[in-house]
Amino acid sequence: MSLSNLSLAIVEPTYTVNVGHLARLAKNFGLSSLILINPSFNMEEALPYASHGADILRSSKTMSFKEVLEHFDLVVGTTAIPGGSRNIRRDVVPPEVAAKRILSSKGSVCIVFGRETTGLTNDELELCDMVISIPTGTSYRTLNISHAAAIILYTLVATRSPKTKRSEVPRSIRTLLLDSAVELANLSAFPKYKIPLLREALKMIINRSSPTPREATLILGLFRKAILALSRKD
């Protein structure tokens, strides 16, 4: 099974050993690329840790977080701190659940690892299409980045790839769908304090269910017609 449509990214890497090991893992599992977001490490010192993945490290690309969102069809964040029932944007999934979603995608996918000391921010996690957290069975869930990457990549390989893969809904359509839901909620006198929760809930439903572009467009059409009808009543 090929993971050639998958890339790894790390935000603000500073430790040479971690970057080198990520490049080695990318080589081990046949990934397409390694992306560095605002890096501040010594490339030459990291190369020995990459071993046979040194070519991937040398050809790594530097991007901003925004550019990663624009470049990839599916962006998967990672966190060691799962949220409770009151914090919807931290409603994360384990690697085996994420694997099914990732493997069913025809589009380009990027798994993003956060800063080596503080991870991804809440705002960055909110911008991701899906968030993975690895359960350890203890209260100490924080793993070394390369260890977490190895677990996630192995889970992908160990999970049977779907026979048919689905095209990703363009990010512009997904955003329009969420914005339309918010607009419809406002017109429907939906409680304002619940609207951000509604948006996040719908976002997670879309990302978990992996709708086809046609399905998403049909739902969007319904939202737009409902908005138009309610606007005329006013």
Image (tube, rainbow, N blue to C red):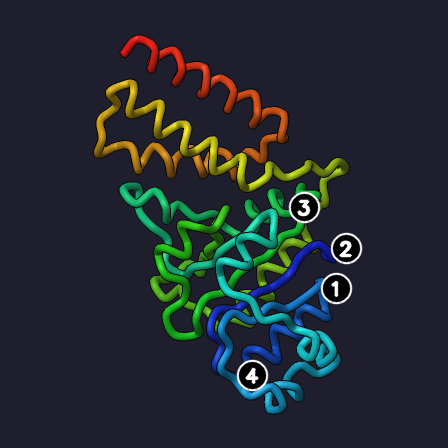
Q: Which mark is residue 17?
A: 4
Give the mark, 4 or 3, whose residue is nearer the N terminus. 4
- In the image, what residue type sits under mark 2? Ser
Toward the viewer: 171 or 212? 171
- In the image, what residue type sits under mark 4? Val
Residue ID at (45%, 66%): 114
Dots 1, 3 in contact, CB < 8 A: no
Q: Which mark is residue 193?
A: none
The answer, for residue 139, to whether it is visible in the render is: yes
For the residues carrying marks 4 and 3, which lies nearer the camera in this image? 3
- In the image, what residue type sits under mark 3? Gly
Toward the viewer: 160 or 146? 146
Toward the viewer: 122 or 229? 229
Q: Which mark is residue 30?
A: 1
Task: Determine crowd level at label 1: few under 14, some 14-19, many 20+ residues with C-alpha closer than 10 A.
Answer: some
Residue 200 place in picture, x, y as percent:
38, 39
Cα gap from disc 1 to disc 3, whole angstroms: 16 Å
Give the mark, 1 or 3, whose residue is nearer the N terminus. 1
Q: Which residue is mark 3?
A: 107
Give the mark, 2 or 4, whose residue is nearer the N terminus. 2
Query: Toward which corner of the image does residue 3 lie, by quadrant?
Result: bottom right
For the residues carrying marks 1 and 3, which lies nearer the camera in this image? 3
Q: Which mark is residue 2?
A: 2
Residue ID at (66%, 51%): 108
Give the mark, 4 or 1, whose residue is nearer the N terminus. 4
